[in-house]
Image: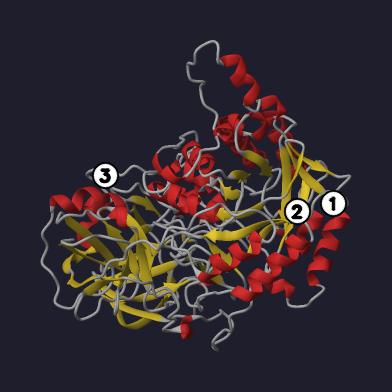
Amino acid sequence: MPEFPPRNPPRDGRSAVSDSRTPLSAMAPKKPRCLPSLLLPLLTLLLPQADTRSFVVDRDHDRFLLDGVPFRYVSGSLHYFRVPRVLWADRLFKMRMSGLNTVQFYVPWNYHEPEPGVYNFHGSRDLIAFLNEAAIANLLVILRPGPYICAEWEMGGLPAWLLRKPKIHLRTSDPDFLAAVDSWFKVLLPKIYPWLYHNGGNIISIQVENEYGSYRACDFSYMRHLAGLFRALLGDKILLFTTDGPEGLKCGSLQGLYTTVDFGPGLLSKADNMTKIFARLRKYEPHGPLVNSEYYTGWLDYWGQNHSTRSIPSVTKGLEKMLKLGASVNMYMFHGGTNFGYWNGADEKGRFLPITTSYDYDAPISEAGDPTPKLFALRDVISKFQEIPLGPLPPPSPKMMLGPLTLHLDGDLLDFLNFLCPQGPIHSILPMTFEAVKQDHGFMLYRTFLSYTVSKPTRFWVPNNRVHDRAYVMVDGVFHGVLERNMKHKLFVMGQVGAKLDVLLESMGRLSFGSNSSDFKGLLEPPVLGQTVLTEWLMFPLKVDKLVKWWFPLQLLKKSRPQNPSGPTFYSTTFPILGSSGDTFLYLPGWTKGQVWINGFNLGRYWTKRGPQQTLYVPRPLLYPRGALNKITLLELENAPPQPQIQFLDRPILNSTLHRTYIYSLTADVQSTPEPMELSGH
């Protein structure tokens, strides 16, 4: 996640919520304070000692023991990488006040190692700071470091630079993959070692890999390698576990790792389904507590399909039944958050399905951090089985409305090519992938010149569905249309000999689940014009975020502005907030598809024309208050409305699929029916 711009004055991340909490000091490793020597012996007797702390499986009584006492966790998932750092404390506090005693979260490898051997644990990537916030909120931690995490996150958390070796086999014993994994974990795992519960921290268990039984490889040597690596770096006291959907337990479980299962209300439509699922789990883990590591409170959204929801009665009924069985449960998600920037993943379920910017998930805590009726219903269920912290939950955050605001045309993307790619293009006879030129995310421009005159409309196409993922086609700067992965678009172009043919490629996020094969981006085969294979390409890896953040404010370029712009075009405006500021939701009526930045921060993708998501969540800390000028920049990729206006609303619009007929398969011209997605996949 890009860092939020600095605010004046800076906000203390815990000032709003931490004053009303009592930190669980034993969960946050700290240096001892200096005390009078006479008090030290007494303090030694009173404080829990690290060597007496334990979290273990009691197989004789089918339960966990925490410090020797029977324990059951009721947990919720929250992803620090989907929530601005200044809001971590708020979200964690609300989870604790909901009755949870544990938080579960992933660690996305690609978020912390953007280039081989280059690590980032600062700002919104400060994993240790998040562990500390969880400790302050009196929450234990279930850590899921992967290396693969799914999470509907770009490439399932695996770094795109792995694909610079095109023949690499991900999530297997491939030596190239294992070498990269070993190098990463030798950096990550020592960082979290002091935070293991028996060392005085709050991490009670750690997952190895993630739903490996849903992957085609079923490579037990790979899983044994990971288990050995975790043990070598973390020791033998920490509880290591796996989780899989009911059908994935065979390839996902491993002797020596505690086996858990995941399922949601959708699999509980029949009264005996839960019994059957846990009976299947018992075949792989005969003794010990029952654990559902992912009990789905909602579901993810795909562009072009309806917003997913799970009814409150179905979610609460399943939770209560599991708790009556004595099971430990993690609710996925308890707070979903946002896929800021380019971080969304994608699925392959018969076709390529990119995931929306919003990760609201119909979770108990909304994308904007507000308690929902689902939260209060779940809290009531939890209160039947364990104590709920005293005190009310904070009310919803203040919301703000603003606008409409008119945006000004800054110019075509092609006008800024020298600033977007200052190092100049790369030349190749055949087009190269994003990975081959070290472009991990975003956009790349492919350019060639017509070697002959095309005097009548001629089909421009890419064989074998090798557009990954959307191509915006221009001839001499005039936008002609779009080619898209898995879509049967037909595009025709004309041009004189020497005409400039530009193809802007957008990566819509790498596969995070499904086949999970190496998902290369760009033009994976050379395009064809009529029957002529086009060669001699220039490739411009574009630094769009740097242009927006650093160069646009300098107004380095003033271009003539077309009367009827279409195709990839920049728009912007500035606006003050004169009254009180608050969270808000950016609404883009009439716009087609593109990317949005506010004060240089990449808010994410919009796709108004396809839906279902119509608004983008704008956290209050992103905005400058008290009359200071805020700047919004849009890169509209297709067509802007006649009146290029935007609004800020006080509530989200997440379920408005305007053009569902855009969803086609390669082999059928009829509208596809969204299939139910009830199984595991995180």
First in sequence: mark 3 vs mark 1: 3
Mark 1 lies on a secondary structure that is loop
Name the residue type under label 3: Pro
- Residue closest to the eye, 387 or 184: 387
166 shown above or below 346:
above
- Distance between the alpha carbons at the discs numbered 1 and 2: 8 Å
Name the residue type under label 2: Thr
First in sequence: mark 1 vs mark 2: 2
Mark 2 lies on a secondary structure that is strand
In percent of the image, x 43 and y 64: which residue is there? Answer: 357
Q: Is residue 552 left or right of residue 400?
A: left
Q: How is the image coloured?
A: secondary structure
Q: Residue 522's x, y, as percent?
A: 45, 60
* Residue 637, quarter of picture: bottom left
Q: Residue 443's x, y, as percent?
A: 37, 58
From this viewpoint, which residue is outermost toward the bottom?
670
Name the residue type under label 1: Glu
- Residue closest to the eye, 149 or 260: 260
385 shown above or below 105:
below
Mark 3 lies on a secondary structure that is loop
Q: Residue 406's x, y, as percent?
A: 17, 72
First in sequence: mark 2 vs mark 3: 3
Residue named by callout 1? 285
Q: Is residue 201 left or right of residue 558?
A: right
- Residue closest to the eye, 550 or 44: 44
Residue named by callout 3? 6
- Distance between the alpha carbons at the discs numbered 2 and 3: 42 Å
Mark 1 and mark 2 residues within 8 Å of each other at the beta carbon: yes
Residue named by callout 2? 260
